[in-house]
């Protein structure tokens, strides 16, 4: 799964630590999501979308390998 978290953070000029605080998770969790090493829960995905004021589908997109 691809994500645009880093791009959205840059648009809002916030750090991983800032985003983590807003989303009520650790900075390491945000880092792992950005690196594609962690797939967030539905609740966290919705939280992130609200923080960035975008739809979840603008943050996360499926890749062909996600269908295997």
Image (cartoon, grey):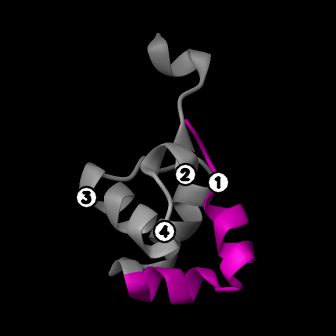
**Image quadrant where residue 64 sits:** top right
The quarter of the picture where residue 46 lies is bottom left
Judged from the image, the secondary structure of the residue bearing numbered disc 3 is helix
First of labels 1, 4 by sequence position: 1
Residue, x 53% and y 29% (percent of image)?
A: 62
- Dot 1 or dot 3: first in sequence order is 1
Cα gap from disc 2 to disc 1, whole angstroms: 5 Å
Say if mark 2 contacts mark 1, CB within 8 Å: yes
State how far apart marks 1 and 3 are (Cα).
17 Å
Residue occupied by mark 1 = 4
Q: Nearer the viewer, mark 1 or mark 4?
A: 4
- Tell which circle, 3 or 4, labels the residue nearer the N-terminal end: 3
Q: Secondary structure at mark 4?
A: loop
Residue topped by disc 4: 53
The tag earlier along the polypeptide, 2 or 1, is 1
Classify residue 39 as left or right of residue 11.
Answer: left
**3D distance between C-alphas at marks 4 and 2:** 10 Å
Q: Which residue is mark 2?
A: 59
Residue 11 as seen in the image, left or right of residue 52: right
Read off the magenta span: 1-22
Dot 2 lies on which element? Answer: helix
- Numbered marks: total: 4
Mark 1, Cα crowd under 10 Å, few <14 / some 14-19 / many 20+, is some
Q: Which residue is mark 3?
A: 43
Q: Which of 30 and 22 lies nearest the eye of the viewer? A: 22
* Quadrant (top left, top right, bottom left, bottom right) of the N terminus: top right
């Amino acid at each position: 799964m691809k994500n645009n978290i880093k791009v959205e953070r840059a648009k809002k000029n916030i750090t991983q630590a800032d985003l983590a605080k807003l989303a009520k998770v650790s900075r390491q969790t945000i880092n792992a999501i950005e690196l594609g090493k962690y797939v967030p829960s539905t609740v966290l995905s919705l939280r992130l979308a609200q923080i960035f004021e975008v739809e979840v589908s603008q943050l996360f997109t499926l890749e062909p390998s996600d269908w295997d």
